[in-house]
Image (cartoon, coloured by chain):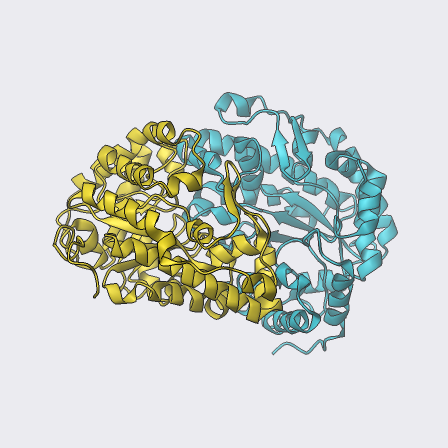
Chain colours: A yellow, B cyan
Amino acid sequence: MSLPDNHPLIDGRTTHSPLVAAYSGARPSRRPVWFMRQAGRSLPEYRELRADVPMLDACLDPAMASEITLQPVRRHDVDAAIFFSDIVVPLRLAGVDVEIKPGVGPVMGAPVRTADDVARLGALTPDALTPVAEGVARTVAALGGTPLIGFAGAPFTLAAYLVEGGPSRDHLAARTLMHADPETWEALTTWAADVTGQFLRAQVLAGASAAQLFDSWAGALSLADYVDRVAPASARALSHVADLGIRKVHFGTGTSELLGAMRDVGADVVGVDYRLPLDEANRRLGGTTPLQGNIDPALLAAPWPVLEAHVRDVVTRGAQAPGHVVNLGHGVPPETNPDVLTRVAQLVHDLPLDDRP
Amino acid sequence: MSLPDNHPLIDGRTTHSPLVAAYSGARPSRRPVWFMRQAGRSLPEYRELRADVPMLDACLDPAMASEITLQPVRRHDVDAAIFFSDIVVPLRLAGVDVEIKPGVGPVMGAPVRTADDVARLGALTPDALTPVAEGVARTVAALGGTPLIGFAGAPFTLAAYLVEGGPSRDHLAARTLMHADPETWEALTTWAADVTGQFLRAQVLAGASAAQLFDSWAGALSLADYVDRVAPASARALSHVADLGIRKVHFGTGTSELLGAMRDVGADVVGVDYRLPLDEANRRLGGTTPLQGNIDPALLAAPWPVLEAHVRDVVTRGAQAPGHVVNLGHGVPPETNPDVLTRVAQLVHDLPLDDRP
């Protein structure tokens, strides 16, 4: 453990927080809940603050990133903040020509498809990460006992964007490359693992009490491709924070078939998307792994009795796991009424926290 | 069985074809292979013929639809044609304001989200299906002993387009509706089941020797939502051809968790996407169901030795099922070199057709 003395897990601010307890398989003082993409377009205060600021500029402005990170914590009484950023931030900081086009997503100046393209990718210097560390430090200073979760994209998803040059439905070019030119694929995902791992490490050293790796597109892969062509890089990414003693969460959508493999790259907690009930996810993971999830975001727009029954069901199923942090099974849809999220958080906190069976 | 006397399954032209044999669990004379989206943009002769003709106009021009359907059969020596159409054709024929925007997909003039919206949906009259029946009849007359597969979309996927008003990544509005207003959802999917079922029946009566139902977006659903909110409508769609004695194939992507449920709506054959190996799919289905699939389309762009090894693996795994029709695990990507498809078909035909264990 090489966390600085003023880190919240060292000075004790977040050590016994509900989130850290549940991630560790210990009994939390209340049932923890937060929402993926809780900081973002569902909040009017976010839309006002972001206004016309380009996404990556907002991520790299320490004051703005910090304020956006704090907004949902103030509003919803959630048990964690997650650092407002984007998975391509470390690419930008390493010199990749990338921007985020509204309504489209990350778009590269040029795709990265050959050994030469990969060889030209730059390194991520510690100095470049200064705005990230500063944003985290500001946030953690304001959060008090509420833990901050560090945020990073997994190498496959980053590589998929780099190879495709932008978003795609089937990630065909990336999935072709992993078989057509395995050496270039390995070099690319190794590079992505290192920059995203450094990005995550900077957040933890600056005060994040946990870390979540997002492999948004992993659900496009067969288990064999995941294990053979992707898992080694994801393990390498997480190895960048392995010595820091924080809990590591791993999440992707459409990953019902991959949960064990995603845990086995070095994750302590598995995030489960809305498709698979948590009791079944727990069974597949052998009953040994704390879970996070998995309220269906589609139900946030349903009448309250429908949503409430669903949240209760998620909580009941999650109670079978050796730790459960309530969350959505995918990000908050932009059109979500934020009052509904506040009410869900309150419901989760009000439900009795039974002893586990 | 109420097929007309000149139907290829009645006059015997396709009765013993490799496709129909494999779909029926009988030993085929050669290992059958065809490719989803084999008729389409991968073929220069298709791009030349379609030129600036809007997609739905092409589908409803009997001569053009027939010619496009025949192109890949001539070129690749595949064991089936699949009728060139689009899943929204029956919506257009029932009076829905829908067009297919190039690069986007089906776009509705207005979304269908309320009970009133559903009540206003029109019926599909037999007359409206005349161009479809004529296109099929022309095709079948030209195909000789090669069977034609009828083509239709499943009610969930159609309803998802109708509710969203166009393509979407997560089908949130549709998935909200199924829980927020189950009666409207049931009415909508029942309507969709009937129009798509009538569309399929018209193709079979006009000469199609099998039928495939495409539920493109079913992989967005949990098993519980699929079984409770979608399967009844899919069963209703297939019931429209249940008395005709043809084999019914059911396919969707990302459906590894749904295979049994998709079979149990009345399918004889299950199409498997590229994510799940066929031996595992066969195990999940209890070893009783012929399979179709599942070459990874991403490998069509890989060097031939990589693709060849993959095709051999698919064939070996598929041989465990009580019937296997080789296909892709998703549609042909538009940028595919058609010569590769021809070579794959030849490889599949050249591999020894061992007795099943």
Quadrant of the image containing the C terminus of chain B: bottom right
Q: Is residue A95 visible?
A: yes
Residue at 43%, 69% (x, y): give it.
A232
Q: Which quarter of the figure has residue A271? A: bottom left
Give x and y (percent) for residue B293.
63, 61
Specify whether residue B7 is in view.
Answer: no
Question: B30 or B197: nearer the eye?
Answer: B30
Q: How many marks?
A: 0
Q: Is residue B251 left or right of residue A96?
A: right
Q: Residue A151, percent across and down?
A: 34, 51
> x and y percent of residue A23 in the render?
23, 56
- The percent coordinates of residue B161 (x first, y second) are 57, 35
Relative to B133, say whether B308 is above or below: below
Q: Is residue A269 left or right of residue A175?
A: left
Q: Is residue B279 left or right of residue B352?
A: left
Does A335 appear above or below A118? above
Q: Nearer the viewer, residue A89 or B242?
A: A89
Q: Closest to the observer: B214 or A298? A: A298
User: Height in image: A27 above or below B320?
Assistant: above
Give the side of residue A184 with respect to residue B128, left or right: left
